[in-house]
């Protein structure tokens, strides 16, 4: 089987003298399946040159976009319309017809590049490319096509705010198999298909225009073996972090800078914790590790300012209790923080799944606090589940997680570890591809 993947981000990173396949995330997860059959990955080329690169047996077709297209397709429709809406942030949702036209044009360009790659099984990823399954189907009716939506699918009343709501659902239904992280997202998607297209829906399927599309909840995991290796290798760095903290208990938060991640609310909860439990003021240090993201968009720039101001205020009030690192850390450094940390604060306001909690479960030393509004909450019930909007509740939960009886903590940690292993990303990939290939189109 030859796999043709379509995803906005390319699975490459630059190294001296050329390219390497990316080490983390989706790229690393799909690579084994792509390599076996001489697969292709179609992605945006942020350099703008386009062309095909072959790296370690993987063919990457790079789609060049003009700056205007990037601003409208990626900066506009994908990240100012679909992203906020999917996460339930209606007040951040914006719509422009010109964005939609650019989104259609870019989806078409991706689809055509994928079709040009020859025969194979197509696997389209995420909200940037929701129209591609249908576009591919129109040109090649017998194709086998899978689609995975990696972010939440919101309830119908929220999704209906999108003027192109029906077209997005119709685009996705060009696939044979559609995957989401939770049964709740599946139900919301089916409700949208029924209400907006009059499709027939039932247990695990949507029937529309004479075709039956399977719709499944298939939660993504991390590469647990890789995480275990990173944890092992991180011992010396983790030791150095603990030494430098001078005996303080360590908390860690790690996120892309995004309003869905609840960083402001988390810092507020942490500040309340210190105010409420004075004996911890000199006994705890939170490392907030924030990766720059989508920096061209106003909402992200404003959030950055808010976080920096808050960090300053907290550091002034509670010297030494908070360290903010705003940079893209390497995997080795990230796992050193996990390993050093007595607890992790994983408190998004809404998250499709969340992989940080899974990385901490494998790589860390204690229990994670986990938002009820992350897809991961239903798969990791032994975490300390919190409502991230409730800063007093967060403050109490931080106290609770740092005061846990070690036996209780270790039991819960082992249960969580078993759950992370069961979700391993290699199983996720094989389960999706298996279901897709075993499927009649
Ligand atoms: C989320 C999306 C991904 C996206 C990532 C980083 O996880 O589901 O598709 O790649 O955020 O965002 P960026 O805009 O930098 O690609």
Image (tube, helix red, strand yellow):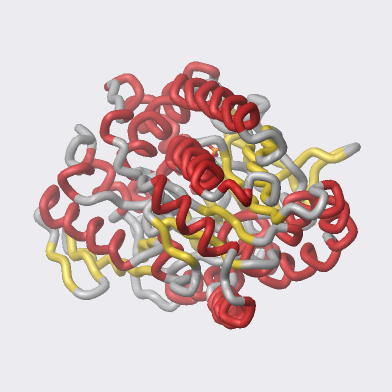
Measuring 63% from the left and 37% from the top, which residue is drawn there?
A: 291
Q: Residue extending furthest front? A: 279
Image quarter of the N terminus: bottom right
- The relative height of residue 150 versus residue 260 in the rendered view (above or below) is below
User: How far across and how far down the image is residue 90, in percent?
Assistant: 26, 34
Quarter holding the C terminus is bottom left
Instruction: Say whether residue 300 is left or right of residue 327.
Output: left
Q: Judge whether 274 appears above or below 430 on screen.
A: above
Residue located 57% across and 40% down the image: 256
Res. 366 image quadrant = bottom right
Residue 102, visible in the rendered structure: yes
Q: Position of residue 98 (x, y in %)?
A: 32, 19
Report whether 225 appears left or right of 79: right
Q: List x then y, in percent, for residue 217.
A: 37, 68
Asked if residue 19 lies left or right of residue 86, the reply is right
User: Is any atom of residue 110 visible in this view?
Assistant: no
Q: Residue 226: give x, y in percent of width and height.
A: 74, 66
Nearer to the camera, 145 or 356: 356
Q: Which residue does the image show at 56% across and 25% down from the upper left?
A: 295
In the displayed structure image, the side of residue 67 where residue 45 appears, left or right: right
Count of all numbered marks drawn on residues in the image: 0
* In the foreground, 303 or 151: 303
In the image, 351 versus 95, the foreground residue is: 351
Relative to 48, residue 129 above or below? below
- Tell me what residue is drawn at x 47 percent, y 71 percent: 380
């Amino acid at each position: 089987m030859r796999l043709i993947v379509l995803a906005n981000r390319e699975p490459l990173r630059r190294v001296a003298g050329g390219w390497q396949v990316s080490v983390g995330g989706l790229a690393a997860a799909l690579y084994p399946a792509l390599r076996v059959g001489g697969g292709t990955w179609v992605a945006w080329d942020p350099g703008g040159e386009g062309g095909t690169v072959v790296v370690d047996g993987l063919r990457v077709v790079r789609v060049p976009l003009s700056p205007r297209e990037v601003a409208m397709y990626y900066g506009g429709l994908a990240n100012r319309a679909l992203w906020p809406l999917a996460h339930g942030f209606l007040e951040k949702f914006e719509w422009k017809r010109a964005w939609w036209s650019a989104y259609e044009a870019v989806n078409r360009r991706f689809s055509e590049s994928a079709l040009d790659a020859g025969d194979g099984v197509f696997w389209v990823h995420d909200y940037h490319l929701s129209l591609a399954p249908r576009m591919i189907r129109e040109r090649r009716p017998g194709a086998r096509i899978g689609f995975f939506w990696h972010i939440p699918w919101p309830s119908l009343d929220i999704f209906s705010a999108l003027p192109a709501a029906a077209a997005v659902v119709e685009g996705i239904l060009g696939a044979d198999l559609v995957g989401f992280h939770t049964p709740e997202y599946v139900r919301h998607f089916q409700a949208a298909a029924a209400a907006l297209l009059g499709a027939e829906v039932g247990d695990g399927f949507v029937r529309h225009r004479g075709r039956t599309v399977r719709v499944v909840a298939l939660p993504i995991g991390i590469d647990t073996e890789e995480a275990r290796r990173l944890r092992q290798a991180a011992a010396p760095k983790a030791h150095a972090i603990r030494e430098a903290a001078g005996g303080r208990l360590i908390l860690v938060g790690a996120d892309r800078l995004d309003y869905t991640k609840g960083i402001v609310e988390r810092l507020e909860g942490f500040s309340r914790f210190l105010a409420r439990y004075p004996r911890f003021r000199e006994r705890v240090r939170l490392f907030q590790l924030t990766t720059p993201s989508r920096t061209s968009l106003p909402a992200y720039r404003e959030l950055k300012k808010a976080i920096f101001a808050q960090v300053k205020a907290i550091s002034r009030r509670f010297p030494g209790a908070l360290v903010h690192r705003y940079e893209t850390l390497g995997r080795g450094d990230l796992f050193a923080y996990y390993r050093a940390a007595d607890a992790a604060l994983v408190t998004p306001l809404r998250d499709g799944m969340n992989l940080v909690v899974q990385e901490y479960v494998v790589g860390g030393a204690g229990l994670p606090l986990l938002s009820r509004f992350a897809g991961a909450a239903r798969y990791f019930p032994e975490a300390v589940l919190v409502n991230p909007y409730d800063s007093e509740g967060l403050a109490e939960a931080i106290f609770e997680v740092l005061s846990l009886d070690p036996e209780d903590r270790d039991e819960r940690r082992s249960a969580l570890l078993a759950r992370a292993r069961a979700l391993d990303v290699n199983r996720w990939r094989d389960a999706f591809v298996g279901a897709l290939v075993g499927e009649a189109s």
